[in-house]
Amino acid sequence: MRTTIFGGHGKVALLLAPLLVEAGHEVRSVIRNPDHVADVEATGATAVVSSVEDADLDALTDLLRGSDAVVWSAGAGGGDPERTDAVDRDAAIRSMDAAVAAGVGRYVMVSFSGASPDHLVPEDDPFRRYQDAKIAADDHLRGTDLGWTVLGPGALTTEASDGRVNPHASSRDGDESPRELVARVAAAVLADERAVGRTLVFGKGDVPVEDWLASLG
């Protein structure tokens, strides 16, 4: 597939791109900073310089035209509530609407396990703005006609991963998810019809990703 990754210089995306290239995908990684082109293209992906925060619906539709799949792995990085809304909610939603307009069939959202009204932190917690933004974006995706999958990893870590998950993870259990595992899961679900229309919450564990996906039926 021709796959476009938003947030192409993020840690998950830099691990995901070479997995997709190795699997035979044509990968385009969208980045905001032109200084990151070399890092992205070292993964085998083609770098596309564009600010998802500033790009309107028409620009994003043009960017996605010809793509078969989208992986959203972009984020504002926290700290600025207004930018959190602009990137994690508004730009993500625009990218979904653009994917529909461009005829993209598949959309994988890298979210997090706590993006649920069941796990809300207090309103005065600074993290709540990010949580609300991700919940809104995920909900919008579920309401589209895209072949969507929402990934809900636990707290991200930098440790290596052998590709095994805990498919019974919950944000309340303190599950951790190595970024390498998130990349492996994203690569695995992208071309797997069993993952379409599902929200997959996971952490590191003992179940191989392929066995987990097979259990989805």
Image (cartoon, helix red, strand yellow):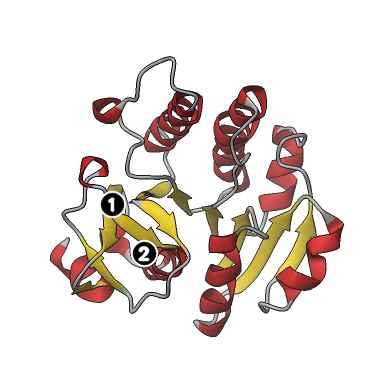
134 vs 13, left or right, is left
Measured as percent of width and height from the top left, residue 86 is found at 65, 28
Judge whether 65 appears above or below 133 on screen. below
Which of label 2 and label 1 is nearer to you? 1
103 vs 83, left or right, is left
Query: Which quarter of the figure is the C terminus placed in?
Result: bottom left
Please, what secondary structure does the residue beneath circle 2 have? helix
Measured as percent of width and height from the top left, residue 174 is found at 26, 48
Residue 189 bears which disc, if any?
A: 2
37 vs 214, left or right, is right
Residue under pointer 1 = 200
Q: Residue furthest right?
A: 34
Disc 1 residue type?
A: Leu
Query: Is residue 91 something one can see in this rendering?
Result: yes
Q: Residue at x 43, y 70 (%)?
A: 159
> Marks 2 and 1, Cα distance to the nearest angstrom?
10 Å
Q: Residue at x 74, y 47 (%)?
A: 62
The quarter of the picture where residue 84 lies is top right
Measured as percent of width and height from the top left, residue 134 is found at 46, 34
Judge whether 144 appears above or below 217 on screen. above
Q: Residue at x 22, y 67 (%)?
A: 205
Q: Earlier in the sequence, mark 2 or mark 1?
A: 2
Disc 2 residue type?
A: Val
Query: Is residue 1 something one can see in this rendering?
Result: no
Measured as percent of width and height from the top left, residue 185 is found at 37, 66
Query: Which quarter of the figure is the N terminus placed in?
Result: bottom right
Please, what secondary structure does the residue beneath circle 1 have? strand
The quarter of the picture where residue 101 lies is top right
Q: Is the Cβ of the residue at disc 2 closer than 8 Å to that at disc 1?
A: yes
